[in-house]
Amino acid sequence: MALSRLLLLSLSLPLFAAACATDDDVTDDAVIEPGSSFHLMPLTGDKPQNAITPRIAGLTFFGGPLLKNVNVHPVFWNSATKLQSNINSFYPAVVGGSPLYKLLAQYNIGSGTAVAGIVDTSTTASVRDSAVQSRISALITAGRLPAPTANTYYPVHFPSGMTITAPDGSRSCVQFCAYHGTFVRNGVNVNYGIVPDIGQSGCSGGCGGSTVTNNTDSVASHELVEATTDPAVGLATVFGPPLGWYDQPDNQEIGDLCNAQQGTSAGFVVQKEWSNAAHACVDH
């Protein structure tokens, strides 16, 4: 998504007031501040992104925060979320020194850690982004998720049958495969990801050309690496901080430049990422 569109969202888009139905009776007194936004991974099928934009200038660092040693805390929306075992193995393998993460050393990123995801009890019903933010905040307040730090990333994985609506009205498996975003809670950035069921209609065949498991891992890696290298993109209002690594001429992040190009790393299918050093999309 172009930064100009993100800037408009950051400056003018109010948070939705919708709340997510849940079986947990949690009172969350945290303050979620206005101004949060996001960065989409668009539906492209298996067409490589750089076939669309063949001339890539490369990534520039704009001085914003980075998740230099990312700490991943996945959330499964409820017990119907598929591929939980795979996802629980995927994140620690990839961030814990895999070839994919070693290539990020050129962007001043090191290896990270990940834990098994928590299984929440939220209902399988379509939600807006603001409801997801509210649920993450409530889980932090309840102690089911740790409080955010400068390295924390909360990817939220959803079951089939749900539509997640982004702040601009875009819908999962209609306009996008996934996205990562940031909201400010009690003065601290909360970096999170939205990963719908990639096997459901729209995402199936629109978010990669492999199996459902492989495409899920590829999409999850796209958001993971972008959240690592440019976590606060949604809060940026200029080409400067809090923007991290970003391709200004093409208005894209590290994963967008290689969207839908799949490779392997640490035994998992991942999306290739842009390397300034190789001036190419690579997986190691």
Image: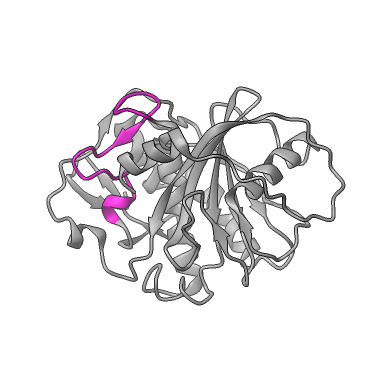
Horizontal side of 241 relative to 199 (left or right) equals left
Return the residue found at the far right.
25
Q: Judge by depth and name the residue closer to the eye, 11 or 219.
A: 11
Q: Residue at x 87, y 47 (%)?
A: 25
The prevailing secondary structure element of the residues shown in magenta is: loop
Q: Is residue 62 above or below residue 262?
A: above
Q: Residue at x 40, y 26 (%)?
A: 242
Q: Judge by depth and name the residue closer to the eye, 23 or 85.
A: 23
Horizontal side of 27 relative to 89 (left or right) equals right
Would residue 90 be seen by someone viewing this image from the given angle? yes
Return the residue found at the far left.
55
Residue 31: name its quadrant: top right
Q: Is residue 174 above or below residue 168?
A: below
Residue 245: name its quadrant: top left
Horizontal side of 103 relative to 222 (left or right) equals left
Q: Judge by depth and name the residue closer to the eye, 247 or 222.
A: 247
Q: Residue at x 31, y 24 (%)?
A: 240
Would residue 267 be seen by someone viewing this image from the given angle? no
Q: Is residue 262 magenta?
A: no
What are the residue bounds of the magenta stretch? 237-258
